[in-house]
Image: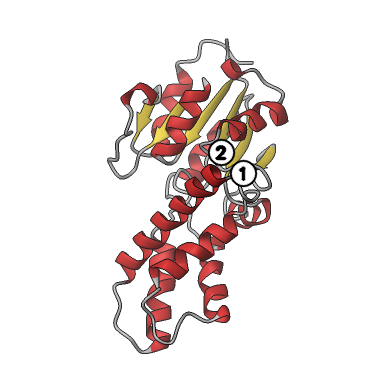
Amino acid sequence: MAIRAITFDVYSALFDTVSSLTEALREFFKSRGIVGDAEQAGRTWRAKQREYLLIANSLDREPALNRRAIEAGARFALRELSPPLTADELRRLVAAWERLPPWPEVAGVLAEIRRRPYVMATLSNGDEAMQRRLLAQVPVRFDRIISTEGGKFKPHPSAYGKALAVLDVRVDELLHVAGSATDAMGATAFGIRTVWVNRTGDAVVDSRLAPANEISDLSHLLPLLDRETTYP
């Protein structure tokens, strides 16, 4: 069956979640007049934000709110501060997530895909407003902006089911471009053909859930799409 729609993870697959957070933390440490490892703090922040998402899915106590996960990750990364992180400092740090730069090849690749007859959508744990602010940096129109907000975070099966429902496609008509190992495994487990943009040389923890394709940056997606013999 020909691919009719392509969904893109936003964080990691399309946007650099490292450099902007590191710079925001450097500015924060400077404002405090303290010496801190901004790169390590940024890695911890991102890791704990992801951990929060997975725990929230397991506990099933509240609807998906990515901003809450971002705030929790920042508090953890800076938990040893004295005095503690203030509400205003936290607000400024969280704002860095709305200034993440797109990876260098992203605009060109998305523009080429836009010229083809695919439905293009995001599928992200980020809320819709945060996604739209980021996507404003890329001169390419997406047909739908899909957020897990209010439901379950990826890699919960319902997140991928939501994409099928919103786009009105069958599972074999959708291609998902993942930006993390957990997203790649989740989409694959759901039966969606998945391409993982693995920029860091990571690996899936369960080889049974390895995605159909793994690429080092988004430019390698185009040759994969060129292999499609028919368009929808």
- Give 79 or 177, whichever is nearer the viewer: 79
- Residue at 57% over, 46% down: 125
In which quadrant of the rendered image does the N terminus lie? top right
Q: Position of residue 104 (x, y in %)?
A: 42, 50
Q: Is residue 207 left or right of residue 197?
A: left
77 versus 111 height, above or below: below
Applied colour scheme:
secondary structure
Quarter of image, res 164: top right
- Give 120 or 175, whichever is nearer the viewer: 175
Q: Earlier in the sequence, mark 1 or mark 2?
A: 2
Question: Mark 2 is on which residue type?
Answer: Ala
- The residue indicated by pointer 1 is 140
27 versus 102 height, above or below: below
Contact (Cβ within 8 Å) of mark 1 with mark 2 = yes
Q: Is residue 145 left or right of residue 222?
A: right
- Inter-mark Cα distance, 1 to 2: 6 Å
- The residue indicated by pointer 2 is 111
Badge 2 local density, few (<14 within 10 Å), some, or many (20+)? some
Q: Position of residue 114 (x, y in %)?
A: 60, 33
Badge 1 local density, few (<14 within 10 Å), some, or many (20+)? some
